[in-house]
Image (cartoon, helix red, strand yellow):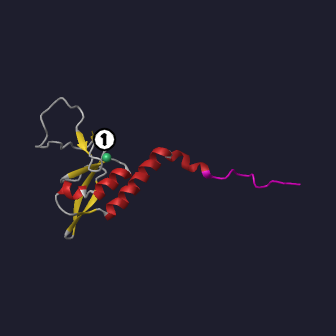
Amino acid sequence: MKGTDVASRPEDPGHHRSTHPLRTCVGCRRRDRRSHVIRVVARPVGELSVAVIDERRRLSGRGAWLHPDPACLDLAVRRRAFNRAFRRPVDTAQFAVDFRAYLERRHARSDSPPSSLEAGHYPHGNSMSTQR
Ligand SMILES: [Zn+2]
């Protein structure tokens, strides 16, 4: 299941030169492939909006793009880049926490395969050591 592709954007330029659509990171302002950046959307909470990670890239609305890099997060927050990207005040306090947790999760996942988790059991029958 790949999911229904609803990538028909009216703003999509008709160039067929670029095979990989580029997105501008709101942190470092560099352009990168879509698969290299994380999508961020603003979700209304009460009277304000908070930035949230769109992990599955299926939330509707205007999106901002950010590298999976704490430095880019820092820059984006300092420049209030999300306010500009979403054209409204966006709270990023919780987002910063979530983003770092997300990065750690990503890192942990690629670092240690889940199959090695069961290696911590004690060998059986070895406790009868007679040390005389
Ligand atoms: Zn960046």
Asked if residue 126 lies in the magenta stretch, the reply is: yes
At 17% from the left edge and 61% from the top edge, which residue is drawn? Answer: 88
Q: Local crowd at mark 1 within 10 Å, few (<14), some, or many (≥20)? A: few
Q: Quadrant of the C terminus?
A: bottom right
Picture quarter with the N terminus: top left
Q: What element carries label 1?
A: helix
Amino acid beneath label 1: Ser
Q: Which residue is drawn at 22% across and 37% down?
A: 21
Q: Mark 1 points at which residue?
A: 35
Task: Identify the magenta region.
Answer: 120-132
Q: Is residue 20 above or below residue 121?
A: above
Whether residue 1 is visible here, answered yes or no, is no
30 horizontally vs 84: left or right: right
Describe residue 87's horizontal placement relative to residue 65 as left or right: left
Q: Which residue lies furthest to the right in this view?
A: 132
Left or right for 56, reference 112: left
Residue 132 horizontal side relative to residue 57, left or right: right
Q: Residue at x 26, y 46 (%)?
A: 29
Q: Position of residue 98 (x, y in %)?
A: 36, 59
Residue 64 location in percent, x, y? 23, 51
The x, y position of residue 117, in whole percent, is 55, 50
